[in-house]
Image (tube, helix red, strand yellow):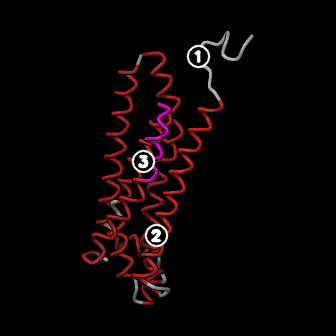
Amino acid sequence: MRPGEGTSGPSVSLTAVGRSAVVLTGGTVIAQLIALVRQLFFAGQVGATSELDALFIGLALPLAVTFVLTAGVRTAIVPAYTETMREQGSTKARQLVGSIVFWMGLAGAVSAVLVWVFAEQLVALTGPGLAAEGTAVDAVLYMRLLAPTILIGVITSVLVAVTQAESMFSVMAFVLVAEPLLGFAFMVYFWDDLG
């Protein structure tokens, strides 16, 4: 029996897996370079001061909320999508994804708004020592500046999972690059107004 014979699905070649791995690795490398540039931007704007502590307090909660909102969905969406595709067809699978994108987007948007509105109280909880240093106000401004990244991160996580389920690795790599790039562009654009 030759490879691929006697199986119900298409055979996967090492070349295809290798090509997909190279594309995803390239996207990840570019995303990490953008993250490095973002860190250098922060350091250049803030310096190694108590203001940097305020920035990290402002950044921690949006990152944590994004992770909490997406951890289960990222894991569950691929098998749910592929099962729906297999049993009910591509239209139903895409309707499932559309519903997930809508509800996750709504959860991300509501979370971003709540973080924005309650930033003062959240900074008091997550960075109680900042008040003594007088940097709590800065942490609130940073948290408000970074709150929209929750929505960007949630949508990106769902799109990455869907592109994985569809074996669209080039698109997946693009999304991996687009998320930090959009977040960084947002921060740079609004830095003087909000930061």
Nearest the viewer among 61 and 3 is 3
Q: Position of residue 77 (x, y in %)?
A: 48, 35
Question: How many residues crowd around disc 1 within 10 Å: few (fewer than 14), some, or many (20 or more)?
Answer: few
Q: Position of residue 52 (x, y in %)?
A: 46, 81
Helix or strand or loop: what does disc 3 sit on? Answer: helix
Badge 2 is on which residue? 37
Using the numbered discs, state the Cα–Cα distance from disc 3 to disc 1 in whole angstroms.
Answer: 28 Å
Mark nearer the N terminus (2 vs 3): 2
Using the numbered discs, state the Cα–Cα distance from disc 2 to disc 3 in whole angstroms.
Answer: 18 Å
Q: Quadrant of residue 130?
A: bottom left
Residue found at x 67% / y 11%: 5
Residue found at x 50% / y 22%: 83
Which part of the image, by quadrant, shows the N terminus?
A: top right
Can you say whether 19 is above or below 135 in the image?
A: above
Residue found at x 40% / y 25%: 93
Using the numbered discs, state the Cα–Cα distance from disc 1 to disc 2 in whole angstroms.
Answer: 43 Å
> In the image, which disc is placed on residue 150?
none
Where does the magenta region start and end? 166-177
Mark nearer the N terminus (1 vs 2): 1
Badge 1 is on which residue? 9
Nearest the viewer among 128 and 193 is 193
The residue furthest right is 1
Q: Amino acid at mark 3?
A: Val
